[in-house]
Amino acid sequence: GTDATLFVAQQDGSIAAWDTTNQVKRCSVSVKKGIRKLDYCQKASLLAIAEHRGKVKLFDANLRLEAEFQANTGLLQDCSFSPDGKRLAVAFDDVGVIWDIENLVEINRLEGHLAGIFSIAWHPQQERIATGGAARNVCLWDARTGQLLMRVEGHRSPITTLSWDLAGNSLLS
């Protein structure tokens, strides 16, 4: 099953799905060069790939292309699925954008970052999204309204990675 799968994406555009139980490659696919980030939603069985040139590609667990859309014309930095797998938050420049991935439409924007966003992370159980980046602060947003709820300052360097624990009690930056 997909809970025993390791997805590996390379800068050259190759993606492989490995069965970690049997230690074999299940399948692979090649896309254009420039994979930036990926996120997997087990509930929706979808893998999202954010590419350098602003494109997002959605694959099923067997790496069959389900959909693709142009999220931005420039560099995408990160992407993160909502807990239900119906939306995808994408970070580029100093903006976060929430997409309805069933209809492939933008439904909200997270605006107000002081500099470029490098990481975006959807809370595992709530309608909250965390962003961080060049401004060396973490922002917490309401995913429904796009409203900035909180800004935490004090990092000494840019934030490149954000990650919630499974319960959503702690955010690592």
Image: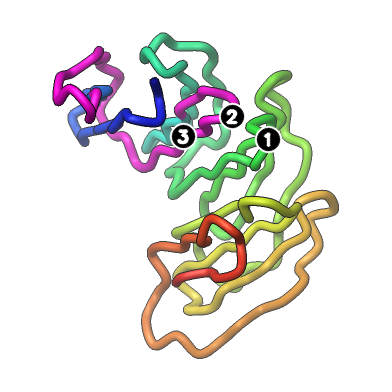
Q: How many numbered marks does the figure carry?
A: 3
Q: Magenta includes 31?
A: yes
Q: Are marks 3 and 1 in contact (CB under 8 Å)?
A: no
Query: Which residue is depicted at the point 37% across and 13% down?
Result: 62
Q: Are marks 2 and 1 in contact (CB under 8 Å)?
A: yes
Q: Which one is in front in this view, the residue at disc 2 or the one at disc 3?
A: 2
On screen, residue 65 above or below 13: above
Residue 58 vs residue 41, the one in the foreground: 41
Secondary structure category for the residue under label 3: strand
Q: Is residue 138 left or right of residue 144?
A: left
Tell me residue 20's x, y (percent): 22, 30
Residue 84 is labelled as: 1
Quarter placement of the N terminus: top left
Residue 77 among those drawn in magenta: no
Residue 40's label in the rendered image is: 3
Q: Mark 1: which amino acid?
A: Asp
Residue drawn 42% across and 18% down? 61
Q: CA distance from mark 3 to mark 1?
A: 12 Å
Identify the residue at image location x=57%, y=33%: 71
Question: Mark 2 — residue?
Answer: 43
- Give the left or right position of residue 149, taking residue 160 as reference: right
Label 2 or label 1, whichever comes before in sequence order: 2
Separation of residues labelled 2 and 1 (CA atoms): 7 Å
Residue 2, image quadrant: top left
Dot 3 or dot 1: first in sequence order is 3
Where in the figure is residue 82, as x and y percent of width and height? 64, 41
Residue pushed farthest right? 145
Range of residues picked out in magenta: 19-47
> Image check: 40 left or right of 146?
left
Residue 57, relative to residue 143: is it above or below? Answer: above
Helix, strand or loop status at disc 1: loop
